[in-house]
Image: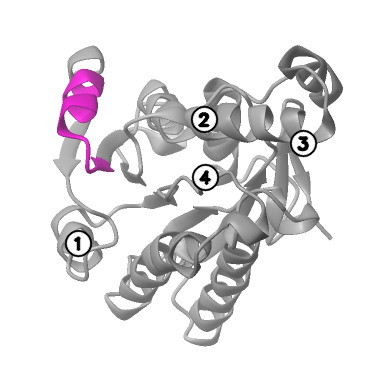
Amino acid sequence: MDELKGQATLVVGASRGLGRGIAEAFDDAGASVIAVARDRSALENLATERAGVVPEVADAAYPTAAGTLLDRHSPRVLAIVAGAAPLPRPLHQQTWETFSLNWNTDVRIAFQWLRESLLRPLDPGARIIVMSSGAALRGSPLSGGYSGAKATLRFIANYANEEAERAGLGITVRTVLPNLTPKTELGHAGAAGYARRAGISYDTFLEQLGDPLTPQIAGAAFVRLATNEVPPALAYLLTSDGLQPVP
């Protein structure tokens, strides 16, 4: 953990859910955490509870946000977690606007931050961790284009890692695919929708999911990735048991 002490760690989407757990875990590990989100009150709450956390109120999808904040903080670790909550409806009850929401938000955010990280570039040894979703492996029929967008995050993270290697930048890019969890607002809505779809109670559906992934587990996993304490891989499934390399 001493490896992270004082190291600038920028968490994009740090105000709630897994992103907040990730920011808190890096703070516990002694990193200098920069928390980025649009929700000023949530960030101020985080900064009040965590005196070492520097809040940056910004829309991560805004065209100049990535370049401005990377120039300002030059992070050693960049965690890209931010994304939009999909509309929990089946395909025929979506509009094109709701179906494409995660393409226009999640994919745009990852593309812009990865692009700026390579153009700048970040310093040699920098580690970038992109949060995708387990839905990228299994599909998600109640969330429009969500699973396809999350699969694309994995592709472009791999592309960025390849370009960093080709250019000899010394930057690594990895993807984390968390399982559905009721411990976040997004996961709770998804679990409720799939319980209704299956004609079972919410509690029964949760029992089928098994032990839930928590923000604390996610935070510990990101810290392990940032300190190379896991088997080498380009992508990892994240469950309540931790990280598992994806073939």
Mark 4–mark 3 Cα distance, whole angstroms, equals 38 Å
Q: Position of residue 169 (x, y in %)?
A: 44, 76
Q: CA distance from mark 4 to mark 1?
A: 23 Å
Q: Is residue 19 left or right of residue 70?
A: right
Q: Is residue 229 left or right of residue 56?
A: right
* Residue type, numbered disc 1: Ala
First reached walking from the N terminus: tag 3 or tag 1: 1
Name the amino acid type tagged 2: Gly
Going from N to C along the chain, the mark reached first, 2 or 1, is 1
Residue annotated with mark 4: 226
Quarter holding residue 97: bottom left
**Label of residue 65 in the image:** 1
Give the crowd class for mark 1: few <14, some 14-19, many >=20 residues within 10 Å. Answer: some
Which-is-in-front pick, marks 3 and 2? 3
Badge 3 marks a residue whose secondary structure is: helix
Q: Which residues are magenta?
A: 36-47
